[in-house]
Every structure is written in structure tokens, then in C-alpha cells.
Image (cartoon, rainbow, N blue to C red):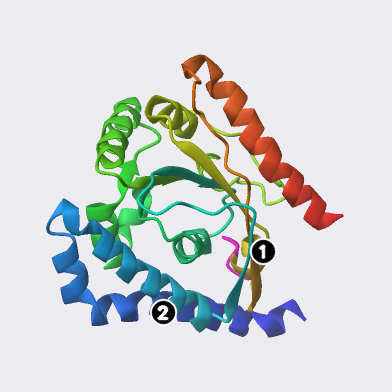
Amino acid sequence: MKIVTYPFFVVYRVWFYILITVPIVVLFPLLLLSTLKQRWYPTFFKLAKIWAGFILYGMGLIPSVKREATYQKNKSYMFVSNHTSMTDIMLMLYVTKNPFVFVGKKELSKIPLFGFFYRRTCILVDRKNPRSRRDVFQSAQEKLRQGLSICIFPEGGVPEQQSILLDSFKDGAFRLAIEHQIDIAPMVFFDNKKRFSFSFFSGSPGKLRVKTLALISTKGTSLDNKRELNQLTRTAILNELKHSLA
């Protein structure tokens, strides 16, 4: 039976990359113009939200958002969530109205066309290069000073074993949040792995459930508290994931 479904999975994956590419081609002049100056980034972000919604609905992936937290306009946050799928990027853009900048792996910059704007608008990290990690902090601090938010998937990548519900968190997101005294805004993505995992022969259209969890304040904390905030955030996300499986 699995062999019979293989053509569907091939078409499903190819269709995903078509949906990524088409709006970028159509919106290319506007996208390019909106990246020419840093103060125009909010315009780019709005276009990116349109791009994200086009892909999700085009794939038959319907977001269903439950909110425990609301985000104030013109306020910076540290957005974090579990990471299991390429659709995490689109879903984060779809859910969040506050303009933010992704901190993401350098490898994605190699994707044709998408990678062009990814390099221009995201903070790239080469996890094999310690110097790159230091540069990330400097770039993120600059974006926060501009009044933008930051989005980091604190697992540091998608767990190699798909059986892992939630990997351990790196400290980088929490260090930045403490240094700038901004709230941590956790989210839980429940269905992205099921709907569009990194395993090629898998996935299907359906609902993408999202829950925005209560904000975690960093007011009055110091770098000595980063592990505590790390564990507090991870536990909140993990408990929601476990509860969804019960």
C-alpha cells in the first residue's frame, strides 16, 4: 500500500516548492524594494505573511490558532516554538503580527530564489562555526534596537530522530531576551510534523493547530537566570505537546 501512495507524496512535495516559488516571482519587485532599507522591513514582513498564507492554504494546511497570550503592537518579543517542519516558518509568520526576524540555519540560503530573500532578511547561523554564533548575537541585538522582534527555534534544528517529542533547548534565545529585557513568547505547533515532516514520503493536508502560551517575563532577571528561563519555557511547550497526545 505504501508504494501506491508514493506518487501522491512526490506531487505533494513538488507542489510545496511551486507554492514557495510562485508568489516570490510575482511579488519580486515589491519584495526586493522592501529590503533595500532597514526601515522598510515591516513592509517586507507583511508581504512575507501573504506568502506564508498562500503556501499553507495552497497545501490544504489550515491554521487553527488558540491564544493564551496577545502581543502588544510596537513591542519586541522573543518568539520561540518547537521545530519539526519547514512549515514552521510559514506558520510562525501567519500567526504573528509583530514584525520579527528569523535566526535560522545558513543551509536554507541555498534554496533557489527563496534563499536570496532569506539571506537579505534573516540572521544566518553556521552552527559549525563558533564565530558565526557570536555574530548572530550582534545582528540580533541590532534588530532589537530597531524595535523588531526575534524568532528562534531553540532546539537548534529539527531533531534527527522523529520519535523525539521535544529536544533540549539552546540558551541563545534566552540570553538575548534577558539582555534586552523582552518577554519570551512561546508557541506550540502540534501538527506540523504529521502534516509535512522532513521525511519525504509523508504528510497530508489538514488542520495545523497552534497555541500561543502565556508570556514569560524577563524583567529583573540576569544572565544567571538563563537556564531557569530555558527550562521554564521548554517545560511549558513540552507539557502542551504531551497533553495533545494523551
Looking at this view, is 196 or 223 the one in front? 223
Looking at the image, tell me whether mark 1 or mark 2 is earlier in sequence order: 2
Look at the image and tell me in which quarter the C terminus lies.
bottom right
Residue 230, percent from left and from top: 58, 30
Q: What residue appears at the point 64 percent right and 37 percent down from the top-left corner?
A: 234
* Vertical order, 57 against 125 (above or below): below
Q: Is residue 199 magenta?
A: yes
Amino acid at circle 1: Asp
Residue tagged by mark 2?
19
Crowd tier of the residue under label 1, counting other residues whose Cα lies within 10 Å: few below 14, some 14–19, many 20 or above: many
Is residue 103 visible in the rendered image? The answer is no
> What SS does tag 1 mark?
loop
Looking at this view, is 1 or 213 the one in front? 213
Q: How far is the residue under mark 1 from the one under mark 2? A: 20 Å
State the residue lying farthest toward the top. 224
Q: Is residue 181 magenta?
A: no
Which label belongs to residue 191?
A: 1
Name the image quarter holding residue 73. bottom left
> What SS does tag 2 mark?
helix
- Horizontal side, residue 92 vs residue 145: left or right: right
Looking at this view, is 200 or 47 the one in front? 47
Look at the image and tell me in which quarter the N terminus lies.
bottom right
Q: Nearer the viewer, mark 1 or mark 2?
A: 1
Residue 231, percent from left and from top: 64, 29
Q: What residue appears at the point 66 percent right and 47 percent down from the top-left corner?
A: 161
Crowd tier of the residue under label 2, counting other residues whose Cα lies within 10 Å: few below 14, some 14–19, many 20 or above: some
| Magenta span of residues | 197-201
Residue 226, percent from left and from top: 53, 23
